[in-house]
Image (cartoon, grey):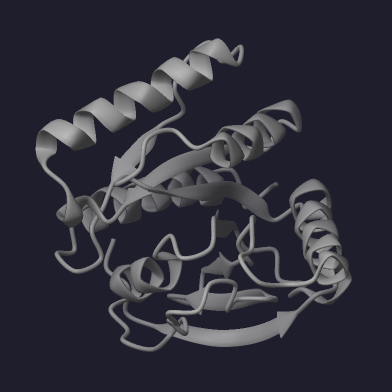
Amino acid sequence: MKINTAEFVISNSDVSKCPKDRLPEYAFIGRSNVGKSSLINMLTNQKKLAKTSGRPGKTQLINHFLINNNWFLVDLPGYGYAKVSKKTKSVFQQFITDYFETREQLVCAFVLIDIRHEAQTIDIEFMSYMGESEIPFCIIFTKADKISKVKIDSHIAAYKKSMFANNWAEMPQYFVTSATESLGKENVLSYIDEVNQEIFKGGGQF
């Protein structure tokens, strides 16, 4: 898939105010500072579509971007913020939960994980929530240019081991990416394209 157009549509913290269009949505979420904005900009061939920041927790709303006029990329706030109040965090978590559990147009979430680190409890817990809630998702490992191939393989193996220990029968589909080197771009976009084709072939029913 080639992304020809990518335009910002709306930001809000109320799921009921999300776009009414019956178009497939792909949500991107991960811990703060996982490289989500850089990845989104890389996938969409834009430099500033998603705002990047050195300050964790920059994304604090549900952001909808219309891609090629036929699907939405949804940029969600991270989980596990570094510096926000408990009250604010509870509000974030509530509308994130509302989005995942009520948004019919959501066809797949991409959970972003920094490949530089070994399996993190917060990531495993979040993916367990996704699995228990029967929300379809894939894993995107980010920042693959920062470590060696051997470490990438060992860290992925560690995630597999942790997920199996948490009652997963198999590892969800995953992609290894680098925003600076455009690694994994074609694989992620091809996956989205394949899912979209199946949806549109079925009349766009969710």
Q: In the picture shown, does residue 82 fall above or below 109?
A: below
Looking at the rendering, which quadrant does residue 124 occupy? top right
Looking at the picture, tell me which residue is in the foreground, 114 or 200. 114
Residue displayed at 67% across by 85% down: 10
Left or right: where 16 falls relative to 18: right
Residue at left 35%, top 76%? 41
- Vertical placement of 12 versus 104: above or below? below
Residue 178: x and y in percent read 23, 58
Q: Is residue 73 left or right of residue 12?
A: left
Return the x and y of residue 9 as percentages of the image width and height.
Answer: 62, 86
Q: Quadrant of the N terminus?
A: bottom left
Residue 142 place in picture, x, y as percent: 32, 53
Nearer the observer, 149 or 99: 149
Is 76 on the left-hand or right-hand side of 191? right
Residue at point 74% right, 75% down?
A: 19
Residue 138, given in percent of the width and then of the height, sits at: 47, 40
Q: Is residue 194 visible?
A: no
> Could you say which is closer to the camera, residue 2 or residue 175?
175
Q: Quadrant of residue 161?
A: top left
Image label count = 0
Q: Residue at x 42, y 79 (%)?
A: 54
For residue 50, say whether it is visible: yes
| Left or right placement of residue 88 versus residue 137 in this view | right
